[in-house]
Image: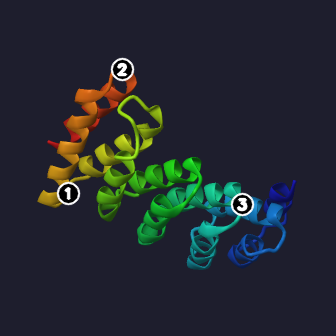
Amino acid sequence: MLLSLLLACGAGPDEIATAIKSENPVMREDGAKIAQNFDDPVVVDALVAVLADPSEQVRLNAIESLAELEATTVSAALVERLQTDESPKVKRAAADALGRLEAKDGVLPILAYLATFSPDDREQLAGIWAIGHIGDAGGLDADAKKASLVALVAIRDTTKDIYVRYSTNTALRTLK
């Protein structure tokens, strides 16, 4: 409802940033969701500010909007969410966003994230994809590439899950 109202009123970046910072959790949630339509530094800063919001949905919406905005300058904030957030959904979204943003500085934290899963756990698929996508973008330094290869081969060789194996094989192909 609030989402429609904000869009219908022709809200600008300042109004969206205000909604994101609101004390009303529904406004923060809606603001963080529609923020993906406003490529503006004020909006990006407001989204980064709510990455630690008490509401899981606000954090998820902020991460999605940052990825949609291709906000490549926020990878450190996404890495922090990946490393410290209590929500598995938020961690998965942060790993996915780091991949979508081709954040090379996210590779080692994503590998650490992957190490927390059992080999057959499908929750790791976003992280596996992210490593492959970042690697496919090229430019990984030798250490990150080697660590990625070792971790992905270990996952592939120990999993019995066909989806995890397929995803690791796909990611490994992109690392060339």
What percent of the width, then of the height, locates residue 84? 50, 63
Q: CA distance from mark 1 to mark 3?
A: 33 Å
Q: Quadrant of the C terminus?
A: top left
The local secondary structure at tag 1 comes to helix
Residue type at tag 1:
Ala
Q: CA distance from mark 1 to mark 2?
A: 26 Å
Residue type at tag 3:
Ser
Is the residue 69 above or below the residue 92 in the image?
below
> Which disc is residue 55 wearing?
3
The local secondary structure at tag 3 comes to loop
User: Would residue 5 be found to the left or right of residue 62 on screen?
Assistant: right
Quadrant housing residue 173: top left
- The local crowd at label 1, few if under 14, some if 14 to 19, many if 20 or more residues have their Cα within 10 Å, is some
Q: Which residue is drawn at the image coordinates 45% and 32% (left, top)?
A: 122
Q: Which residue is drawn at the image coordinates 43% and 42% (left, top)?
A: 126
> Which disc is residue 162 wearing?
2
- The local crowd at label 2, few if under 14, some if 14 to 19, many if 20 or more residues have their Cα within 10 Å, is few
What percent of the width, then of the height, locates residue 129? 37, 41
Residue 68 visible in the shown view: yes
Point out the tag, 3 or 2, that comes first from the N-terminus. Answer: 3
What percent of the width, then of the height, locates residue 121? 44, 32
> Which disc is residue 144 wearing?
1
Point out the tag, 1 or 3, that comes first from the N-terminus. Answer: 3
Tally the numbered discs. 3
Q: Which residue is drawn at the image coordinates 84% and 66% (left, top)?
A: 9
From the viewer's side, name the closer residue of 60 and 42. Answer: 60
The local secondary structure at tag 2 comes to helix
Is the residue 60 above or below the residue 21 in the image?
above
